[in-house]
Image (cartoon, rainbow, N blue to C red):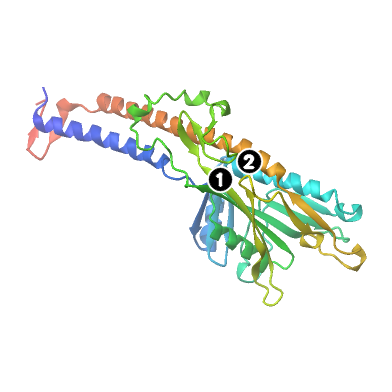
Amino acid sequence: MLIPSEFIIYKARIKESVLAAKQRRDLRFKPLRNVERLHVSMIEFQKLNEILDDDGNDFSPSLSYNSQNSTAVIQWMPSPVHDNFAASLIESGFAARQNLRSEIAAHLVVVGSQRVGAFRGIYENSTEEPDVLFKYRRQDRKTSYTAVVEIGVSESYEELVDDAKLWIEGTREIITVILIKVEENPAYRSPISKFEDDDVENLGFPDYKDLDTDMVISKDPNSTFGPLQINNFVWVNKMSVFLEIWKRDPLNGQAKQQGTRSYFVPDNATSELDLKLSDFYPLNATDGGDTKFSLTFDILRLHLEECREELAVERCRDTLRDIAKCRDNLDDEITLLNDNVSLTRMRVPILGLQTGE
């Protein structure tokens, strides 16, 4: 038989286990960022890089460092929106290249993420991985960087502007930086965060392993990029996407936005962006003058429609899976507590009592 003081200790230990599990679960309901920025010294960044390189994890994040503001950027596994945008832009870049003169197109290369460390000035110790990188092969067979695309889904607009400054003010070669910002309004937060675990079980969700994009329903059938629901809960909010062109100011060498911001999502936004060859290629007298071409957004819009549904499934699946794991962990903790806490040998120093003697 438990005396009152023993029961209080036993109950307190169970409550502590419950609270620990809930705290782990609640972390899942905070807005997720696939990009984290830390203010660290260059030496600290190098140590962080070594640790992540040596952990043997195939899913280690990519790292970059801005020495101007001592900021390390940790890029975790990108969201479906980010990955699809990068792939679409590379595809659009290849399509646009076909419209250029063959002797120039052969020297212009479009690639995905690639770590770059050739910065100068206050950015000398920086490293960066752009989402899309344009390069050209010179006559001496060496490669130079000419333009980059930075895509912000988890990143803020201000953080994208810092990236533009790094590329333009920290190099002599980069001609153009294209910033693409994906905005979700309102910002995502799990729609079931207010429910307790037991209540979630009664909401009618399928097993997280059975979730599929066929279960995603548009809350507004008249809007291609409106809110998306699964089981009557919104997992992706209305999205808009804008694009800006940044270049080097010829007067002071600083990064400066060129022209106006262009929206290509929502539905009634612009369908293409007019560019010039000189935005991506260092022309000389033998190249026969500048050439205009357009970067179309049809592919990006189509891929965004698809990956928004994937994002809804990913968010719903991750939330339900983590709730299930926390519930299982809690059951294991309580079982372990019951197996290992010998109440008949428990000492209660507060009352000066000892049982089982």
Q: Are marks 1 and 2 in contact (CB under 8 Å)?
A: yes
At x 20%, y 26%, the residue is: 342
Image spot of residue 228 (x, y percent) = 52, 36
Is the residue marked by circle 1 packed among few (<14), some (14-19), or many (20+) residues within 10 Å? some
Of pointers 1 and 2, the one earlier in the residue sequence: 1
Image spot of residue 220 (x, y percent) = 53, 36
Image spot of residue 264 (x, y percent) = 65, 49
User: Which of the two residues, 292 or 148, is positioned nearer the viewer here?
Assistant: 292
- What label sits on residue 141 in the rendered view? none
Seen in the picture, residue 235 relative to 111 is either above or below; the reply is above
Q: Secondary structure at mark 1?
A: strand
At x 65%, y 45%, the residue is: 85
- What label sits on residue 239 in the rendered view? 1
Q: Is residue 170 visible?
A: no
Query: How many numbered circles does the render carry?
Result: 2
User: Which of the two residues, 205 or 273, is positioned nearer the viewer here?
Assistant: 273
At x 54%, y 30%, the residue is: 216
- Measure the alpha-carbon separation of dots 1 and 2: 10 Å
- The amino acid type found where label 2 is placed reads Leu
Is 97 positioned to the left or the right of 240 in the image?
Answer: right
Q: Secondary structure at mark 2?
A: helix
Q: Is residue 337 visible?
A: yes
Query: Which residue matches tag 2?
Result: 304
Is 261 positioned to the left or the right of 195 in the image?
Answer: right
> Image quadrant of residue 149?
bottom right
